[in-house]
Image (cartoon, grey):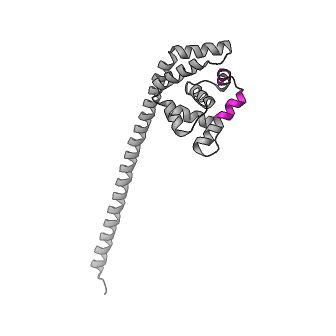
Amino acid sequence: MVLTDRELFLLIICTVFYVTLFIMVLQWNRRKLQLLQSRLDNIHAMQKLAVIEQRTTDTTSLFATDIYHRVKQCLDEGRSLQPGEWHELAEAVNATYAGFTDKLYSLYRMSEQDLHVSLLIKIRLQPKDIATLTAHSKESVSSTRSRLYQKVFGQKGSTRDWDDFILSI
């Protein structure tokens, strides 16, 4: 079959038309996808901001509690918390962060030391202060933090990894 010049011209024009149409549809889809991705990024940014604002509100109310002030007083005096104070601290943290200790216990059967360290991380205390309040060395506190990460997640992690996890729940 031999094509005439006119048929060849029409075939080329149709091919160019369909290729151009295909490229335009691809570009339209790409722009639509970029717009959706941009909207999704904005939603994620707003969600992160809302979480930060909520945490700020939560921690502000926690920092106003009597037990938090007693924790600070214990630090000033260089003494550890008493059993009743640990219970009160757990209640205050659970009131601010619903079910915090239940979530921890659902992940791993924690010792009293593990729970105390996690509670103090949750109220944003430094490792040296955690060591003072738990009557353990700073090294022991660091060991507890990295051990907990490994026990819960089944992989080696840094002390910071455990801290970040505790602050996220």
Residue 92 vs residue 167, the one in the foreground: 92
Taking 17 as reference, is 133 above or below it?
Answer: above
Q: Quadrant of residue 131?
A: top right
- In reply to whether residue 19 is colored magenta, the answer given is no
The mark tally for this picture is 0
Q: Residue at x 57, y 21 (%)?
A: 86
Residue interval drawn in magenta: 130-144
Decide whether the magenta segment is chiefly helix, strand or loop: helix
> The N terminus lies in which quarter of the figure?
bottom left
Determine whether, in the image, residue 136 is placed left or right of residue 54: right
Q: Residue at x 52, y 13 (%)?
A: 66
Residue 7: x and y in percent read 28, 78
Q: Quadrant of residue 47?
A: top left
Residue 130: x and y in percent read 64, 24
Q: Residue at x 71, y 27 (%)?
A: 138
Residue 46 vs residue 146, the one in the foreground: 146
Taking 61 as reference, is 113 above or below it?
Answer: below
Residue 61: x and y in percent read 47, 19
Residue lying furthest bottom in this view?
Answer: 1
Residue 29: x and y in percent read 35, 54
